[in-house]
Image (spheres, rainbow, N blue to C red):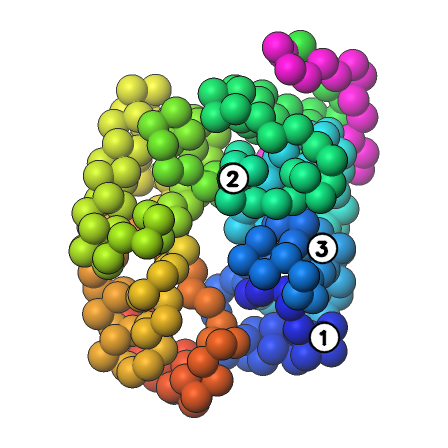
């Protein structure tokens, strides 16, 4: 979901998506829509808490929360709160954030745009802190970048030992963190404008790397969910026809991806009838395969 529509319209769409039996709905955690910074845009975690009260079954999350924007202990408390508001339906998506060359949020917020190596190192510490805060009622942490003392996290999350963590990762260092800490790994199906065949091959390579990194630490690779945000050309045409959608799903299933995240067809409203038909008729058939 993109959070650019009026509140009442967003509630209507998310409630309708829930009736169509989708598994989850995800928001984008950006300060603005950096493709159109002056357009309307709602803050993700505030909106997520509100949507938790407007839905009953569907799981909700951010794909992905940029840890550049928040202190990790505060983020853990925000997530714990939404986990309670949603009665245990939170999916916590975490990512290192886009660089300032792509995202104007850093300049707009007056915060530091870390270099890539520091961004990854800080991300690892933040994931460790969030995981620890969820699992322990009181915790402390001493890292290079973050130091916490006696951090209380009462009453703790609804989901035990913690809400599932999805880690958005593309590069090798981030994929290693996903293998170590993630319940789910999320890849971004864009690859900077590459055609679908290149995206497919790059995703296959990353998936194999994640398998290897899991094995390196003694983790069963099958215990890590593999998620892909469909983007670019495939996102524009996925709901153009039943055949298009089925082909996209089968392509990525064939390389081991077991969760696909699609955009609601905001920008192609003529595709909405096909979207609803796919939800009601095609997805149940694909799930049963």
Instruction: Name the residue located 42 percent from the left edge and 65 percent from the top edge.
Output: 262
- Apparent side of residue 28 relative to residue 215 in the rendered image (left or right): right
Q: Where does the magenta region start and end?
A: 143-164
The residue drawn where x is 61% and y is 50% is 29
Residue 136, above or below 280: above
Q: In the image, what residue occupies the spot 75% across and 62% down? A: 50
Tell me, yes or no, if residue 241 can be seen here. yes
What separation in Å lies between label 1 and label 3 (alpha carbons)?
A: 13 Å
Say which of 176 and 3 sits in front: 3
Q: Which residue is mark 2?
A: 101
Q: Which SS does the magenta portion mostly show?
A: loop
Residue ID for mark 1: 6
Q: Residues within 10 Å of mark 2 (few under 14, many from 20)?
A: few
Residue 113 position within the rendered picture, expressed as x and y whole percent measured from the top left: 60, 30
Exactly how many numbered labels are in the figure? 3
Considering depth in this image, is 110 or 24 the residue closer to the camera? Answer: 110
Task: Provide the secondary structure element on which disc 3 rests.
Answer: loop
Task: Report the quarter where the N terminus lies.
Answer: bottom right
Q: Quadrant of the C terminus?
A: bottom left
- Label 1 to label 2, Cα distance in Å? 29 Å
**In the figure, residue 52 lies in which quadrant?**
bottom right
Is 142 situated above or below 240?
above
Q: Which percent across, then down, holds residue 132?
A: 63, 24
Element marked by disc 2: loop
Q: Secondary structure at mark 1?
A: loop
| 3 or 2: tag closer to the N-terminus | 3
Looking at the image, which residue is at 80% across and 37% down?
155
């Amino acid at each position: 979901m993109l959070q650019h529509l009026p509140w009442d319209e967003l509630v209507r769409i998310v409630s309708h998506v829930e009736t169509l039996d989708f598994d989850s709905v995800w928001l984008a955690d950006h300060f603005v829509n950096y493709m159109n910074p002056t357009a309307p845009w709602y803050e993700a975690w505030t909106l997520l808490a509100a949507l938790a009260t407007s839905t009953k079954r569907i799981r909700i999350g951010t794909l992905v929360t940029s840890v550049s924007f928040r202190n990790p202990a505060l983020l853990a408390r925000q997530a714990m709160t939404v986990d309670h508001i949603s009665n245990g339906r939170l999916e916590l998506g975490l990512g290192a954030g886009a660089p300032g060359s792509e995202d104007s949020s850093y300049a707009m917020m007056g915060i530091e745009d870390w270099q890539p190596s520091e961004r990854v190192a800080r991300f690892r510490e933040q994931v460790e802190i969030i995981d620890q805060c969820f699992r322990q009622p009181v915790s402390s942490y001493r890292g290079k970048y973050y130091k916490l003392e006696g951090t209380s996290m009462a009453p703790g999350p609804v989901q035990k030992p913690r809400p599932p963590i999805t880690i958005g990762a593309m590069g090798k260092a981030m994929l290693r963190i996903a293998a170590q800490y993630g319940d789910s790994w999320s890849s971004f199906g864009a690859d900077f404008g590459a055609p679908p065949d290149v995206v497919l091959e790059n995703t296959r390579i990353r998936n194999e790397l994640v398998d290897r990194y899991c094995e390196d630490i003694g983790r069963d690779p099958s215990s890590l969910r593999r998620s892909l945000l469909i983007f670019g050309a495939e996102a524009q045409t996925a709901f153009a026809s039943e055949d298009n959608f089925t082909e996209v799903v089968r392509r990525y299933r064939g390389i081991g991806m077991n969760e696909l995240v699609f955009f609601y067809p905001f920008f192609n409203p003529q595709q909405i009838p096909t979207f609803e038909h796919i939800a009601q008729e095609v997805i149940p058939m694909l799930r049963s395969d």
